[in-house]
């Protein structure tokens, strides 16, 4: 929230971080509870829905096993692929009983996918039989390359976890079909919904076949020529390298940026980084909600203008929050700068986890910052992109806590966890013991077999006013670099680090151009944004409550039968008069009644009861 | 703006007012300038556009005169009909030169319409040739009854003004075709876009044929059964008499209410009035912008929830403002209560006239209350409903100034004008001499040949704090009834009344549930809402300017080369700091710089230069 929030990254990226393999990380803190629910509830329940909504039958139809009409939207294959990706990750963390159940589902689904592939490698169940002739005829609207991208990502995840090759071979055959079809001397094109770009880069990483990298680059650079519809909505109004503002459909924009960042990570083309940093700065300094949510408009599920961030009609699609996280992660890998991890943290704990209920099987597609009580979580949507995106995101959260680089080991997110990393060929074990994000203390244990010299980078969140670091109960030297505390030393045996982040309640205000938020404040503790829900406030209207910013807010940790052990905040203020006309003559004096208000973490809202909600509270 | 703004009309309507024939009224004040521009510019320029966009060719195609594809939207016939209606009214007020030109255009267009009618009376140029088989198969979406309604209204206007019967006969043949097709024992149905209902009531008034009235009633009462799509968007989610909230597509909702009020005016069915008054109260107390604009959502061009009135993303379609005016007028006829005329005045001078530029040929489809400078007036739209609605509204404004009733003569709107009315068989002449809405004084001359006893009702606008009435320079007794000053006497010869309305600058605030408007005020003088435009304020950012409500605003009448003689207001206050992050820690103190601000009437904004604009100003 401080000045590092705005990044003007003129110089070349300082660091290039590498992820740690998923199987080498375990989480069991606050995020771990979401992962556990994903294994036990989210992924199995979505399997049932993929079946009951005909999404898997679409594959059976394509392979000729059943004879029925295609079901649902033309892009429904992508939901199946996203689920396969998520279910594959889930196997890593599943207990034996869960694993057996999930693996059986996964085997069934991957078999149906493989059986549906055309002999020439093409695979999209909508473009079969009577619609086979229409393949690749409408790249702007028909999501064929988008679905292909999700297939490739799913197949890579499936292969990396299971070591099986069935689905990977399906993806490779389709990728080769696409590579034979599109290219500088072949068919020109770009996808109306980006996704293929990051998938192809990952396939290059998997196979080392540069054709896939070149094809990703081709699809990105072909934009702006009208192949993807020629409109801002599909980010085809300009060549990618001429973009200077995040516009159009938010998920499309951000998936494109993910693909372009992936490409940059492999090719190091400065022109890409220059464009990406300009777009990223525009997003976080002009177009991002305080929840980390993005894409403020219902119309076209799109970004609005600068500072256009309405609260009640915020769109802030769950998929766009995930896409923001995914892009921020890639920018973090490229730069090693904490601004990107700060954004990851902000969106994760607020506008992203808000997308799934505490029961693990109800979802928000849209994530408003203010509501009258009509917005409720749903079991499923006809367009089910958000639930299935959560199904692949939640079991991959482990990916984002730690990275390694030539310099050392990086800790980006704080969560009760364990990681086995390899640094300069030496094995390093690291544990976090913490109740983060609700506690300010993180105990970090670092263990090496043999002495290893490396830097340990601990992210100091931008919201922190002050912090302390102790090593083995004593003081320790460190440097602050790019928002990380760097502990440089030879690590030997077991070392205990304690990181204490000063985690006061923080009151935040907006730029005055966000005119909806005039004289309003938002309340944070650590990375957690709070909101006022009517259910916690039977005697006060959360829309007319006015917080007194001089009265300190109090923290209460309580057990709620739905939410479990939860941190609430209580503030003091007053309620303003509301028994009046829609419009009336201005008068400075309105009736005021003293009131307390109870606040709950925003990402938990609407789990107990629909009702009025506000993130931005009136403020005296 | 005071308590009468909220009408809880439990009792039966008190009055039943009758319009004065258009040809008996002349206007030549502020509204008269808009009428004059309509005759000289708006209507002729739209004729060219109807031709160049193929809208008239669609009729030529249907009659077999030319061979080309149907042009544009399937409802484009309606634009031609609306223009015919407007051009017919225009003939009344045109000078000989204008009249000759307009009549030639009108003759050409009406001829093409008449020639395009099918032998069975059906007329819709989209449903011809290859689409003839699809007639009446999709009432929810295809606007056939909507276009038919506009034809009927145009034909009645054309006949009343020209006394010619060609177009009226076309409309009658089509109406009879519709009456043969639809009915209790025939095809069931309701129109996805209401309009036919008010047209059929007017056709009943024209012909006294009750079939048309019954058919209008049938179409209204068939709603809620799924014939019109079954959705809130088309107001087919419930039976009409069970509606209790204005919802769905704003123009559809309000056109339906117009038709239902017209029906009520003829049948006096209390159940209709009960529904209408509940809907009207919901609109003006929960869902109307301070401009009188309605329909806050881009999505579905629809009403939002109660108090959902975002400024920057206000939709507030010009057609919806016209529809609000049309419905308020009908409710006024039914009740004689000034709340309805107050709404007419509010929307007319603000959210309606904002829809047309001062040059008479550029339009807003959408009328935001705050803008970054990207919203500019257009010459035309692919969906041209708003320009053509203005083309028929502007030359019919004369209709709304005066009415008569059993009790007497009513003056609803103040405007330099002359009216010849007939009361109890006696001729009464009335003149208004005034610079209203920019001046607070109205001189009213009433002249009768023979002495006539009647009540003269003068509307006292709800925004008036105080007023005075003089008769022949002396005091006069009057009663205040339903918002009207009633002067009861025997009128003899020439009498001079002077009405002085105290027209101070007024600062207005919103209900706190309109959370966008927290700590913001709007500025009125008389019925005119002001806004801050960047062009008038080179040294102050109108989005961060904060008005000091204790400093009186000053009025300056200036000559602007585009706007002509215009009233500006100047206020004092300060500008708040804006050189800051999107989000930052709350601090009570922000840098403040003293500033003046110049305000311009809202309906004139964006005539000179695109730029930042705000209606709701920050306020200390």
Image (cartoon, coloured by chain):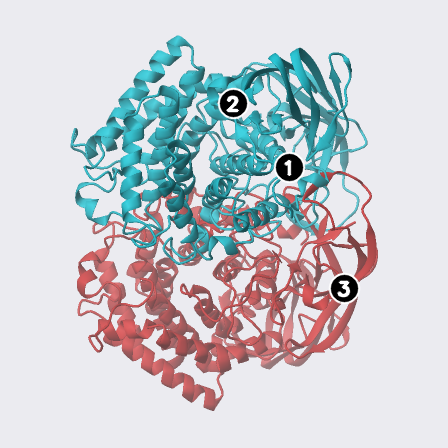
Chain colours: A cyan, B red
Judging by the rendered image, the residue that carries numbered circle 1 is: A339
Q: Residue B240, can we see it?
A: no
- Report in which chain the residue with disc 1 lies: A
In the image, residue B144 lies at what x, y percent?
29, 59
The number of numbered badges drawn on the structure is 3
Q: Nearer the viewer, residue A216 or B300?
A: A216
Which residue was labeled with disc 3?
Answer: B539
Assess disc 1: are there few (<14), some (14-19) or many (≥20) residues with their C-alpha within 10 Å of its C-alpha: many
> On the rendered structure, is B409 left or right of B436?
left
Name the disc covering residue A419, or none. none
Q: Quadrant of residue A154?
A: top left
x, y percentage for residue A319? Answer: 47, 36
* Mark 1 → mark 2, Cα distance in angstroms: 20 Å
Separation of disc 2 and disc 3 at Cα? 52 Å
Q: Is residue A100 above or below residue B376?
A: above
- In this rendering, the answer to whether B450 lies above or below B412 is below
């Amino acid at each position: 929230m401080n000045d590092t929030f705005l990044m003007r990254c003129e110089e070349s990226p300082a660091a290039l971080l590498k992820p740690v393999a998923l199987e080498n990380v375990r989480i069991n803190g606050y995020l771990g509870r979401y992962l556990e629910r994903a294994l036990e509830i989210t992924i199995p329940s979505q399997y049932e829905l993929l079946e009951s909504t005909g999404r898997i039958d679409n594959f059976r139809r394509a392979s000729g096993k059943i004879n029925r009409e295609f079901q649902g939207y033309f892009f429904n294959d992508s939901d199946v692929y996203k689920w396969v990706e998520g279910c594959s990750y889930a196997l890593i963390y599943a207990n034996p009983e869960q694993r057996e159940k999930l693996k059986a589902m996964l085997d069934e689904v991957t078999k149906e996918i493989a059986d549906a592939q055309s002999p020439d490698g093409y695979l999209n169940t909508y473009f079969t039989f009577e619609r086979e002739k229409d393949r690749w005829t409408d790249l702007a609207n028909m999501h064929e390359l988008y679905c292909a991208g999700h297939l490739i990502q799913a197949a890579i995840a499936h292969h990396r976890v299971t070591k099986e090759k069935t689905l990977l071979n399906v993806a490779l055959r389709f990728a080769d079909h696409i590579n034979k079809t599109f290219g500088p001397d072949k068919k020109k094109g770009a996808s109306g919904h980006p996704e293929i770009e990051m998938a192809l880069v990952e396939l290059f990483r998997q196979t080392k076949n540069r054709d896939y990298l070149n094809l990703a680059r081709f699809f990105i650079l072909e934009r702006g020529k009208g192949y993807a519809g020629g409109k801002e909505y599909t980010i085809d109004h300009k060549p990618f390298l001429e973009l200077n503002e995040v516009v159009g459909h938010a998920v499309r924009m951000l998936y494109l940026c993910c693909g372009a960042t992936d490409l940059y990570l492999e090719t190091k083309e400065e022109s890409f980084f220059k464009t990406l940093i300009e777009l990223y700065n525009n997003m976080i300094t002009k177009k991002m909600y305080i929840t980390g949510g993005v894409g403020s408009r219902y119309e076209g599920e799109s970004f609005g203008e600068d500072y256009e961030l309405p609260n009640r009609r915020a769109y802030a699609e769950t998929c766009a929050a995930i896409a923001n996280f995914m892009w921020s992660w890639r920018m973090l890998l490229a730069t090693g700068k904490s601004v990107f991890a700060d954004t990851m943290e902000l969106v994760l704990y607020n506008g992203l986890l808000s997308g799934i209920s505490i029961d693990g099987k109800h979802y928000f597609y849209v994530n408003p910052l203010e509501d009258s009580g009509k917005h409720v979580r749903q079991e499923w949507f006809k367009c089910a992109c958000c639930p299935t995106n959560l199904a692949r995101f939640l079991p991959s959260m482990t990916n984002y806590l730690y990275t390694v680089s030539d310099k050392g080991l990086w800790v980006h997110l704080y969560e009760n966890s364990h990681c086995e990393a390899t640094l300069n060929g030496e094995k390093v074990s690291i544990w976090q013991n913490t109740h983060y994000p609700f506690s300010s203390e993180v105990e970090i244990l670092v263990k090496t077999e043999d002495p290893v010299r490396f830097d340990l980078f601990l992210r100091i969140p931008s919201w922190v006013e002050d912090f302390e670091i102790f090593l083995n109960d004593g003081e320790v030297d460190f440097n602050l670099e790019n928002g990380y505390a760097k502990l440089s030393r030879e690590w030997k045996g077991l070392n205990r680090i304690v990181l204490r982040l000063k985690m006061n309640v923080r009151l935040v205000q907006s730029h005055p151009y966000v005119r909806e938020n005039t004289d309003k404040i938002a309340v944070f503790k650590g990375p957690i944004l709070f909101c006022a829900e009517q259910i916690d406030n039977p005697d006060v209207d959360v829309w007319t409550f006015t917080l007194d910013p001089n009265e300190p807010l109090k923290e209460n940790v309580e057990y709620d039968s739905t939410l479990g052990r939860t941190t609430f905040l209580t503030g003091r203020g007053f309620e303003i008069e509301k028994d009046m006309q829609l419009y009336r003559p201005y008068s400075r004096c309105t009736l005021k009644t003293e009131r307390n208000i109870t606040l709950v973490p925003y990402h938990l809202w609407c789990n107990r009861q629909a009702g009025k909600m506000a993130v931005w509270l009136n403020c005296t």
